[in-house]
Image (tube, rainbow, N blue to C red):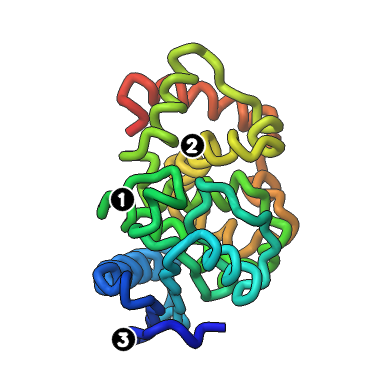
Amino acid sequence: MLDNYLWFSKDYIEVGYTRKDIAFVEETYNALKKACISLSLYFRLKEKFTSIRAVIVPGRNEFDRLVKELLKVDIETPSRPGRIAQTQRTDLVILSPSAYKKDSIYEYCPDEYGRLLFHELTHIFEEFLSPEIEVQQRWWGEGLAIYLSEQWKYEDEFRELVLKGLKNKQIPKFKEIQEDVRLSYQWGWTIVKYIEELYTPGMIVRIVKECEDGDVFNILGKDIKGFEKDWKIWLTKKEKGGLN
């Protein structure tokens, strides 16, 4: 399955690659290590995180093959151009930046690549720590990854769409965010950010480690309607400071 890959291994991180993508190996390793240290501190891990295996694949066809055969994740083929990374357990499959122009909607930017890897590693940490990852709702998992990776600070597909919605007074309801994949990516992180600011990071850690039924609001001990109202008030105040 991985016979054609070369491997770089150091500490608890393995990076698989083909010769054409050797230029991205050190960058990938360094970004994963930095993210792992940061997430270990955030989630208060007492020991080093378990080993991580990342595979940089040279094109869309190989990406789809490894997502199905290595990760055992059933995806459409060919997968959509916006899909450039996939995790399962402690494995990560990444479309190489060398294939972006041909096989994705993105352009390579080192900072964005680093945030992407942080985003994906957040999913790995959540799965590792969660008592039942399969029941967690998309808005929470994606919101957590976008928030902790700080993609919301720098990338228009997350930040500007929220600012535009606030300016036009078009804030979706929680139910819409829960049911709409697009909205879960665009707005989920704002709910995570609100929870962290209201309750401290400790509450985020508690939700990840204790939520067994996907009901984040049950752990918060809050009525969802009242919580949604307070979140919208908080958002409108945040708009004046550019969401920071």
x and y, in percent, of residue 10 in the image: 31, 86
> Could you tell me which residue is drawn at 66 percent across and 44 percent down?
217
Q: Which mark is residue 230?
A: none
**Residue 89 coordinates in the image, percent (x, y):** 58, 73
Crowding at dot 2, Cα within 10 Å, few <14 / some 14-19 / many 20+, comes out as many
Q: CA distance from mark 2 to mark 1?
A: 26 Å
Q: Disc 2, disc 1: CB below 8 Å?
A: no
On the image, the x and y values in percent for residue 99 come to 39, 57
Q: Secondary structure at mark 1?
A: loop
Q: Earlier in the sequence, mark 3 or mark 2?
A: 3
Q: How many marks?
A: 3
Q: Which of the two discs, 2 and 1, sits closer to the camera?
A: 1
Residue 69 in which image quadrant:
bottom right
The residue indicated by pointer 1 is 108
Q: Which residue is mark 2?
A: 190
> Which residue, given by chain and number where applicable, does mark 3 sit on?
10
User: Which amino acid is tagged 1?
Assistant: Tyr
Direction from residue 93 to residue 34 in the image, left or right = left
Mark 3 Cα shell of 10 Å, populated few (<14), some (14-19), many (≥20): few
| 48 vs 103, nearest the viewer | 103
Instruction: Compute the Cα span from label 1 to label 3.
Output: 25 Å
Element type at marker 3?
strand
Q: Residue at x 57, y 71 (%)?
A: 66
Q: Nearer the viewer, residue 177 or 213?
A: 177
Splitting the image into 4 quarters, where does residue 224 fall? top right
Mark earlier in primary sequence (1, 3): 3
Q: Decide which of tag 2 and tag 1 comes sooner along the chain.
A: 1
